[in-house]
Image (spheres, rainbow, N blue to C red):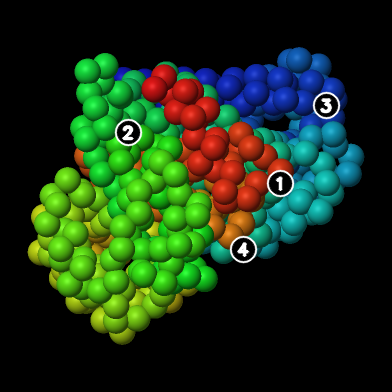
Amino acid sequence: MSIAAGVAGRILMERAGLAVFEALRRRFPEARRVAVLAGPGNNGGDAFVVARLLAEAGLALRCHLLGPAADLRGDAAHAARGYHGPVEPLAAFAPDEADLVLDGLFGAGLSRPAAGEAADAIERANASGVPIVAIDLPSGISGLTGAAPGAAIRASLTVTFFRRKPGHLLEPGRSHCGETVLAPIGIAPSVLDEIAPRTFANEPPLWRDKLPSPDRIGHKYDRGHAVVFSGGVTQTGAGRMAATAALRIGAGLVTVFSPPSALLANAAHLTAIMLQRCEDEAELAERLEDTRLNAFAIGPGFGIGEKAARFVAALLAADRSVVIDADAISSFRDAPQALFEAIGRSGGAGVLTPHGGEFARLFPDLAEGSGSKLDRAREAAARSGAVVVLKGADTVIAAPNGRAAINATGTPYLATAGSGDVLSGMILGWLSQKVPPFEAACAAVWMHGMAARLHGPGLIAEDLPAMLPQVLASLDF
């Protein structure tokens, strides 16, 4: 589209090559011997621009091309002619003789597994332990799905242009990229208006303007009243963690609804969070008469079964916003359509927060299908009528209208019991403050990862709510 708008492809290729050259020199200033791997397309053209700049800077180069030079066309052929050093076949690539490998074999548009000498070169580069810089996306990774259907470069640094692709954020692509640098090369922002993207990186510009800032003359009732359901006496911790997270994220009031058996256990641990008995549907109906209770989270530690399913149905029928997590999701394993229909009839927001196993209980056909994680989450949202938070290292948040965001703040520190309960409470806290459900889920997922990163090693789920003030302060709350 930029070319159609008047920016010559050769100019864009020159800018892309310069961006890669500059990033490479910043990150690996000691490298003196570089092996350049060039493919037959525009990625190969970018690689030849970088090779020319490296040669002009006095570095020792060995440039390797996949296929005959006579097959190069257009801008790539022009860039290859600008490099005046020798060009060797890809089979001659010897990574052990280099300090650095530049990967320009394939770009984001690769739609099939790397094969033959390309696959062999990729595997030798990875096995060598020599740092690799990838142009646009590591060769062998799908730009649409992040999948690696065959051999794929494991880069230390990836330099891409204009905007990231899903393959930079979805696993395993994200891990294969190493550090990703986004370089401007003069593509006008107006191009996005023509593209009309429906997939986004989950970052503050996507949702920051939807979050409320505390009003100087406001009061706690302006900030919503969130409710979390507790499990029985031996399963109270998950609900309390969710409730604490909702309070920390800014809900004006938070109450734990508890069965009688767990009232004393919960009372012993709760201070600013309120506590009410809620044993059955009759008591729930009575509680729902208070319309100030505007957002609910159910599932963490609640128990799987008909009671959970009935409670979810009652909340949705009362037009409340509901975060449906954990046991509440699994309770609809045999009747997912009943849940989707209840969400569709509700005037409130529904947010589903499954990990992979829970997702398979509601959407078995999608879980077993061949689509990407992004595709699965988007289809699940359309089918269920809910915002779907498909959790993992590359959490995807998808709305029924097709918008989706891929999160990149995830960290291995979050692989600890209870971290998902805290996330549910954070989403709940934003919903109680009337943040739209897609933005509420996106903001919570991003902040959840940032809180874990701020804490670092030794993290347990109880630590996460205490880190939220620092995360909020970074956003000028």
Q: Which residue is mark 2?
A: 207
- Which three-letter amino acid code belongs to the residue tagged 4? Gly
Between 205 and 258, the residue placed more toward the observer is 258
Counting from the top left corner in percent of width and height, residue 402 is at 25, 51
Secondary element under disc 4, as helix, strand or loop, is: loop
Q: Which is more foreground, mark 1 or mark 3?
A: 1
Closer to the chain start, of discs 1 and 3, is 3
Give the image quarter of residue 310. bottom left
Q: Which is more foreground, mark 2 or mark 4?
A: 2
Look at 54% across and 37% down and name the residue there.
466
Look at 65% across and 46% down and name the residue there.
459
Circles 2, 3 touching at the beta carbon (< 8 Å): no
Counting from the top left corner in percent of width and height, residue 169 is at 50, 45
Q: Which residue is mark 4?
A: 150
C-alpha separation, residue under disc 2 versus residue under disc 4: 36 Å
Secondary element under disc 1, as helix, strand or loop, is: loop
Q: Is residue 438 above or below residue 228?
A: above
Look at 81% across and 54% down and name the residue there.
127
- Which three-letter amino acid code belongs to the residue tagged 2? Trp
Q: Which mark is residue 301?
A: none
Q: Which residue is mark 3?
A: 31
Look at 70% across and 39% down and name the residue there.
156
C-alpha separation, residue under disc 4 versus residue under disc 3: 29 Å
- Which three-letter amino acid code belongs to the residue tagged 3? Ala
Q: Is residue 137 left or right of residue 279?
A: right
Between 309 and 130, the residue placed more toward the observer is 309
Q: Which is more foreground, mark 2 or mark 1?
A: 1
Between 283 and 315, the residue placed more toward the observer is 283
